[in-house]
Amino acid sequence: MQINTIQTQAYSDQKPGTSGLRKKVKVFQQDHYLENFVQSIFSSLEESDNKSLVIGGDGRYFNREATQIIVKIAVANGFTDFIIGQDGLLSTPAVSHLIRKYKTLGGLILSASHNPGGPDEDFGIKYNISSGGPAPEQYTDDFFAYSQTISSYQIAELDDIDLNTLGEQTIGNINIRIIDPVDDYAELMASLFDFDLLKSVISTGKLSLRFDAMHAITGPYASRILEDILGAPKGSVINAIPLEDFGGHHPDPNLAHAKELAELMFSADATDFAAASDGDGDRNMILGNNIFVTPSDSLAIIAANAQLAPGYAAGISGVARSMPTSQAVDRVAKAMNLPCFETPTGWKFFGNLLDADKITLCGEESFGTGSSHVREKDGLWAVLFWLNILAKKAQPVSQIVHEHWAKYGRDIYCRHDYEAVDTEIANAIMDHLRSQLSALAGQSFASYTVDYADEFSYTDPIDNSVSEQQGIRIGFTDGSRIIFRLSGTGTVGATLRIYLEKYEADATKHAQDPQDALAELIELAEQFCQVKQRTGRVEPTVIT
Ligand code: VG1
Ligand code: CO
């Protein structure tokens, strides 16, 4: 087989963010852009005898072309065994599982997750290591460094591979296995949850549900598991066909982008349970009849009820949450006498804790929940966990949530995002915040007194690696917090995220609307960061 060396020029902007390299499709389509980055990954990896890779993506525009290019570059770089999802499709958690199950060196995920897709929208690529988890910063720093000086890449002269036909294809010493994207994942889910119990309540209509796949990757997974295996009536999974542009929407499961589903759940036609997932299937939004469960509460409730699912009946070793995620899970950990870790934003920071069995469950406020079953957050896993809890407890979602709050108190929570802010203005906002930090502790603002104000820095307890500048935190003496950070997944300008949290022990105040309960903190946040004043915006782009 002919291997060609192609001369190229480095691009200066291939620095991976919170979750891989994300850019507009048009950026990826520039000459040699994708090739450069893929070669930078392979050239940065340590020499290994393991020559196998998993490849799959969320089906967005450019997924197929990118898959073909990656295979050819991988072959030229010595890879001989490939596991690829049919049509180039695999969800992020499914890739993580396949890497672990088939012990490949790693995997490439083609996705920009919750970002919109299409010729004028976003594409992304992420490398996962042999544990199944996202490449930690030591890796991504190397990829970036290599990409800045790359002068050539290697590519094999191969015909495009047939992505549609299941089974093995052999080309010389190269073995390519096209697999059903759902089979292995469905088997894993059946090993963790009580499928017989779930089937008995779902197929009989005792527990009605709606799942919005948002025309993204979880369509095939949810249709198979919820409808075919567990017997939910056909049509329970909506927007089930993956589309290259997600039907023109943001495949982002939150109250703003999964609006129809949210409206249904607050109407007379509400089902007992509803959920949605994102572009690549790792996020989840949980709703019950007349209630939205924040991701932070969802993590806490799953932790408190973990023993109800067979895969977790033996107990959990500990929990972790990203720093901006509410402290709801901390309260459960304390009551259960479990270790609880606070990590920077991004799933890669949970990897070491999971590998060392310091934690079993972890989550992020950004609609991400997961466990040690894979090394990614997992949307359908969270849905099945909730269904398992509902089936066991035989109570409505709202009762479970309110009883949880009554026991632990409620961490009233919301996030305000200002998207596509001019980068210079966004950086100036962060600098302005930094300049205030040293003087804030002890000062009072309205009914709040600042307890601490700092910039979050994380030392990984397993490998002692340090990650700095992971968000600005202002904590108050009553446990309330305001956190500011800039997104690392956006592709246009900068996105400022403001996270607001207030603890309420009094059960008579638990039914409050978060925007009302948090009004004073929302005003204070503006006073500290001046985002409205500096951008002229009157309100956040998205409130979740
Ligand atoms: C966002 C979320 C973060 C999540 C990341 C990847 O990052 O805040 O919690 O891990 O997206 O999720 P940022 O840097 O934009 O805040 V996914 O589902 O887009 O891979
Ligand atoms: Co995602």
Image (spheres, helix red, strand yellow):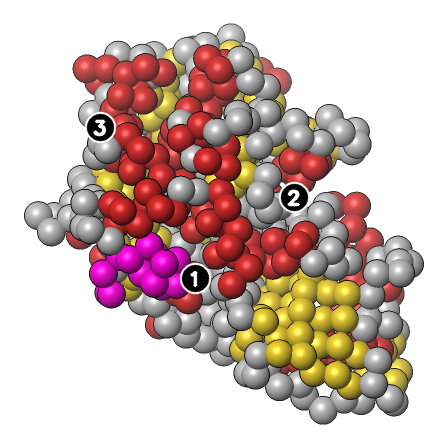
Q: Secondary structure at mark 3?
A: helix
Q: Secondary structure at mark 1?
A: helix
Question: Which residue does the numbered mark 3 point to in the structure image?
Answer: 399
Q: Left or right of 397: which side holds 26?
A: right
Question: Which residue does the numbered mark 1 point to in the structure image?
Answer: 221
Question: Which residue does the numbered mark 2 point to in the structure image?
Answer: 348
Picture residue at 76% right of the left edge, 89% below the top: 158
Residue 147 at x, y percent in the picture: 80, 64
Picture residue at 65% right of the left edge, 35% below the top: 354
Q: Give the main secondary structure, helix, strand or loop, of the magenta stretch.
A: helix
**How much space separates mark 1 and mark 2, taking CA atoms?**
24 Å
Residue 17 at x, y percent in the picture: 64, 52
**How much space separates mark 3 and mark 2, taking CA atoms?**
34 Å
- Which tag, 1 or 3, sits closer to the chain's start? 1
Q: Secondary structure at mark 2?
A: helix
- Circle 2: residue type: Lys
Name the foreground residue: 342 vs 492: 342
Q: Left or right of 146: which side holds 203?
A: left
Name the foreground residue: 25 vs 125: 125
Q: Which residues are drawn in magenta?
A: 221-235
Q: Is residue 460 above or below residue 110?
A: above
